[in-house]
Amino acid sequence: MVSYGLYMNQNKAMPISITRTYSRYSREATLLLGELIRVARKERKLTAQEVADRAGISRGLLQRIEKGDLKCEIGAVFEVAVIVGVKLFAADETTLTRHIRQTEDKLSLLPKSMRKKSKAVHDDF
Amino acid sequence: MVSYGLYMNQNKAMPISITRTYSRYSREATLLLGELIRVARKERKLTAQEVADRAGISRGLLQRIEKGDLKCEIGAVFEVAVIVGVKLFAADETTLTRHIRQTEDKLSLLPKSMRKKSKAVHDDF
DNA sequence: CCATAGTGATCTATATATAAACCATTTTTG
DNA sequence: CAAAAATGGTTTATATATAGATCACTATGG
């Protein structure tokens, strides 16, 4: 959860203390992915520095990824996963592309906006 | 790839222009995840604002996630995925925990460091 | 045993991801 | 059709993720 609030500057509300909360599932999924990456890296006998170099990231960031840090950018995590051979979605590239097309087709059939019949109900009192 | 370079301050090399490159697989995996999220959200008839609120993120960030932006933090992406019901790893929480334990066991059997016998090899001949 | 590669941690400075506030457009409802 | 709601862009200011440099420690291989 991000707390936004009282810190006003230039007449705008600015973030004060960002403290996100994550569900257990998210935390565990990220942790598992990180551990799978570390296992795969070691099984392939690659050093942290090698993988970091290949992914174009720093060794420190790789460490955080392998530890399941939730604040790493998803691109870096996925890139490392690919490099050490951890398949995301358990699908190869062709399958992935096909899935994307299918999903886009599905998306085009759904309504563009999700109107809530909230009804502010003319509560004027 | 991150270019670090010439911008010197306080005797330290600082980043100039960060321009990462991503593999096609990473890009497609992230895109697919985003699209799956959008489809799931619409199927459940949730507005972008609702999901953003529940995930504790801004609507703008949710938009980027659904568009497959590689620079979003993985925690935010996974959290949204959970909220709209996109399963990561196709496993429930208990299974996930078990997998984590198994992976940690596996990890403990692997060598702690991956010494390269780099060896300048005493090639003196 | 010893040299050294690998790991893990901390620190610093910046690039940038993020939230909020707008605005324009599209879509839905009545 | 009109109003309301949702979406999808912007732009702006800051919190923070990141890279790199160190340092201490571990563990590997000779």
Image (tube, coloured by chain):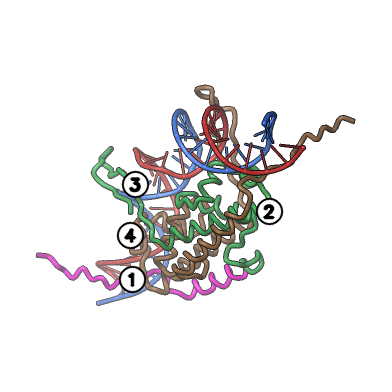
Chain colours: A green, B brown, C blue, D red
Which of the numbered marks, if any, corresponds to residue A115? Answer: 1
Callout 2 amino acid = Arg
Chain of the residue under label 3: A
Residue assigned mark 4: B53
Q: In this view, does D24 lie above or below B21?
A: above
The disc, 1 or 2, on the residue closer to the chain's N-terminal end is 2
Q: Magenta region: which residues?
A: A98-125
Amino acid carrying mark 1 in the image: Arg
Mark 1 and mark 3 in contact? Answer it, CB < 8 Å.
no
Q: Evaluate whether label 4 is on the same chain as label 1.
A: no
Mark 2 closeness class: few <14, some 14–19, many ≥20 residues within 10 Å: few
Distance Cα–Cα, label 4 vs label 3: 15 Å
State the SS at label 2. Answer: loop
Q: What residue type is labelled 4?
A: Asp
Question: Compared with residue B35, is residue A64 higher up or lower down, i.e. above or below?
Answer: above
Dot 2: chain letter:
A
> Mark 2 highlights which residue?
A44
Q: Mark 1 lies on which chain?
A: A
How far separated are the C-alphas under marks 4 and 1? Answer: 16 Å
Q: Do labels 1 and 3 share a chain?
A: yes
In this view of the protein, which residue sits in the foreground, B78 or B46? B78
Q: Are marks 4 and 3 in contact (CB under 8 Å)?
A: no
What secondary structure is marked by label 1? loop
